[in-house]
Amino acid sequence: MHHEFGRLTRRELQALDDPLVIVPLGATEQHGDQLAVGADAVIVTAIAGAVADRLGTSAEVVVTPTIPIGISGHHLPFGGTLTFSAEVYAGMLHDLVIGLRRQALRRTLLLNGHGGNDAAMRTAVERLALVEEPGGTTAGLSYWDAVPAETAAALPAPVPGHAGRFETSLLKALRPDLVRDPGGDADTGPRPLAHEIPGLRADRTRDWRSSDGVTDGAGAATAEFGRTALAGIVAEITARVGEYFAIPAGGGER
């Protein structure tokens, strides 16, 4: 069954049978002129809930409140941004999971919705692996790593990009009230910020500062594309997480 952590009492949480705890990781940062600054948190919250609904047919699944602030220092020059340092964020995730373990909540999935959080999330998972007691398991996944290949192939910029067609389509499908008119910008192609060299991890601070803060135009974004993308992402994450945590695809005992 799918539960929301914040809606349960301590006794109800203690009564759950070895639940999987999903922790959605969001961000609050500028998303151009067309998306609300809470876009990442809204998207990952919806994905976490949909995955929990599916997994919850076979196991107890608890979704915690979304962490709405991440690592977004590269967005500060544009305004509309809240951020932690990478060191603080990785430590916070580590401490959060250790706290869950002290409550006998042994299985945790960190589900990430912001690119700036990815490295710190991985660091936290690696640190936790060194101190986990028997039965304790933590995994981390950034949702765009589960985007179906056909969806990614239809986009002008690498997935998820930033405030471009992909994220705008997702938000149009989930919360159209958080999407603004981008000022009649009909440009649907990639911007300079979208340029990446595969496999190369580099400091791109200058790229961000010299850009308009988005990776590609959102003129072609549609709610229909967003719904299709979300369905594929949720299905893929459900399959991967179910396999890792040994949760059957539907019905039956764990």
Image (cartoon, rainbow, N blue to C red):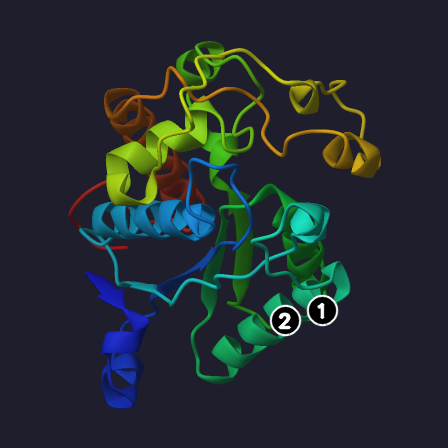
Q: Is residue 187 left or right of residue 72?
A: left
| 76 to the left or right of 173 | right
Tell me the quarter of the picture where residue 59 sits: bottom left
Disc 2 element: helix
**Quarter placement of the C terminus:** bottom left
* 33, 57: nearer the viewer: 33
Examine the rendered structure and indicate whether residue 88 appears above or below residue 170. below
* Residue 70 found in image quarter: bottom right
Q: Is residue 69 above or below residue 142?
A: below
Do the residues under discs 1 and 2 have CB atoms within 8 angstroms? yes
Where residue 178 appears, x then y in whole percent? 32, 44
Q: Position of residue 226 (x, y in %)?
A: 31, 27
Rendering coords of residue 23 (x, y %) = 44, 61
**Distance from the alpha carbon under mark 1 to that under mark 2:** 6 Å
The residue at 26%/26% (across/down) is: 223
- The three-letter amino acid code for the residue at tag 1 is Val
Residue most extreme to the front: 183
Residue drawn at x 52%, y 12% as measured from the top left: 156
In the image, 3 versus 138, the foreground residue is 3
Circle number at residue 88: 1
Nearest the viewer among 198 and 98 is 198
Instruction: Give neighbour class at mark 2: few <14, some 14-19, many 20+ (Cα, 10 Å).
Output: some
**Nearest to the observer: residue 217 or residue 111:** 217
Residue 166, above or below 24:
above
Q: Amino acid at mark 2?
A: Met
Q: Which mark is residue 92?
A: 2
x, y (%) of residue 105?
A: 43, 74
Residue 132 visible from this viewpoint? no
Q: Secondary structure at mark 1?
A: helix
